[in-house]
Amino acid sequence: KKKGDFSGRKFLITAGPTREAIDPVRYLTNRSSGRMGYALAAAAVARGAEVLLISGPVALERPRGVEVYPVQSAEEMYQSVMSLKDKADIIIMCAAVADYTPVTCAEHKMKKQERLRIDLTRTKDILAELGKDKQAFLAGFAAETQNLEGYAKDKLSRKNLDMIIANDVSGPETGFDSEYNAVSIYTEKGAAVHLEKDTKRNLADRILTEIAKNI
Ligand code: PMT
C-alpha cells in the first residue's frame, strides 16, 4: 500500500537549520541542509497528503505541491509551528533547531577584540511543547553521535512522542548534509525498525510507511 495512502491527511514538517543572530552580519547555526525534511515533504505529497513545510534557511528547491513557510531563528520556528500545528494530523520535527541562542543580538557589527565571549541562553524545545498538549501524531528525530538507542528512547518518552527516528550523525556519509541517511525507528510499543543506508528520498518513503502502520 503506497500511492495515495495519505490522501486526506495533513502533515506539518520542519526542516533545515536555524540561524541565531550574534550581530547584523553574524550568526550561529549547524550543518543541516534540509534534505531529510524536504524528502519527507516530497514523499508525503506524492502519497496524496497536504504538506505544510516550515523551513530554516536552506539551498534547496521547494518541493512541488508543498506549502513552504520560511523561518530563520529557533524562536521564529517555534512561532510558526505553534500557529500551524492545529491544522495538521501528523507532525514531523526534522529541523535541527538550535539549542542555544545569543542572549542579545548586537545592534552594530561587533569590532574585533582579542577575546570574545558570547552569552548563550536555551531556546524553547518545540518538540517537547508539542508533546505537552498532543493533538496530532507526533514524530521527532534524534541526531546522536553515541548511545543512539538509549538517547532516542529517552526523547521518545520524555517528550511524549509517538515515534522517534534516530540517526547516527557521527560519520560523514549519513546524517547532516549528505544525500544519504540511515535511521532506526522507535515507538512506544512496536519493535525497533532499522533502515540501512539509502538515499534520503527512499528513506522518507520507508519512514512514512512506518508512520502509516502506527496511526
Ligand atoms: O538536514 P539534513 O542535512 O538532511 O540532515 C538531517 C538531520 C540530521 C538534520 C535530521 O535527520 C535530524 O536528525 N534532525 C533533528 C536534528 C536535531 O536537532 O536533533 P536533536 O536530537 O538535537 O533534537 C531532537 C528533536 O527535538 C528533533 O526532532 C528536533 O527537531 C527537536 N528540537 C530540538 C531542539 C529544539 N529547541 N526544539 C526542537 O523541537
Image (spheres, rainbow, N blue to C red):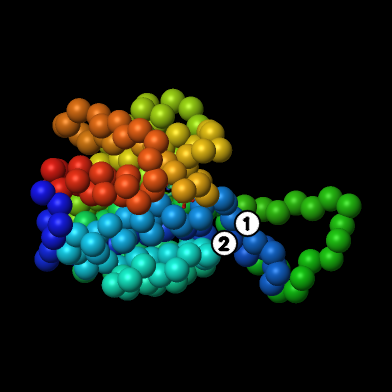
The x and y percentages for residue 87 are 21, 69
Residue 107 seen in render = yes
Vertical position of residue 176 compared to residue 10: above or below = above
Q: Nearer the viewer, residue 140 or 58?
A: 58
- In whole angstroms, how far apart are the C-alphas of marks 2 and 1? 6 Å
Residue, x 33% and y 71% (percent of image)? Answer: 64
For marks 2 and 1 on the same chain, the one whose residue lies earlier in the sequence: 2
Residue under the point 75% across and 74% down: 108
- Considering depth in this image, is 46 or 154 the residue closer to the camera? 46
Residue 135: image x %, image y %?
Answer: 18, 57
Q: What is the number of callouts on the image?
A: 2
Residue under the point 62% across and 52% down: 120
Check if mark 2's residue and mark 1's residue have beta carbons within 8 Å. yes
Residue 208: image x %, image y %?
23, 49
Mark linked to residue 19: 2
The residue at label 2 has a CB less than 8 Å from ligand 1:
no
**Mark 2 surroundings within 10 Å by alpha-carbon count, few (fewer than 14), some (14 through 19), many (20 or more):** many
**Would the CB of label 1 be found within 8 Å of ligand 1?**
no
Residue 70 is left or right of residue 196, and the answer is right
- The answer to whether residue 104 is seen in the rendering is no
Residue annotated with mark 1: 28
Residue 110: name its quadrant.
bottom right
Q: Which amino acid type corresponds to the residue marked 2 in the rendered image?
A: Arg
Q: Farthest residue in the right direction?
A: 114
Q: For residue 7, what is the image quadrant?
A: bottom left
Callout 1 secondary element: strand
Name the amino acid type tagged 1.
Answer: Leu
Secondary structure at numbered mark 2: loop
Q: Residue at x 13, y 43 (%)?
A: 213
User: Measured along the vertical axis of the image, is residue 30 above or below residue 213?
Assistant: below
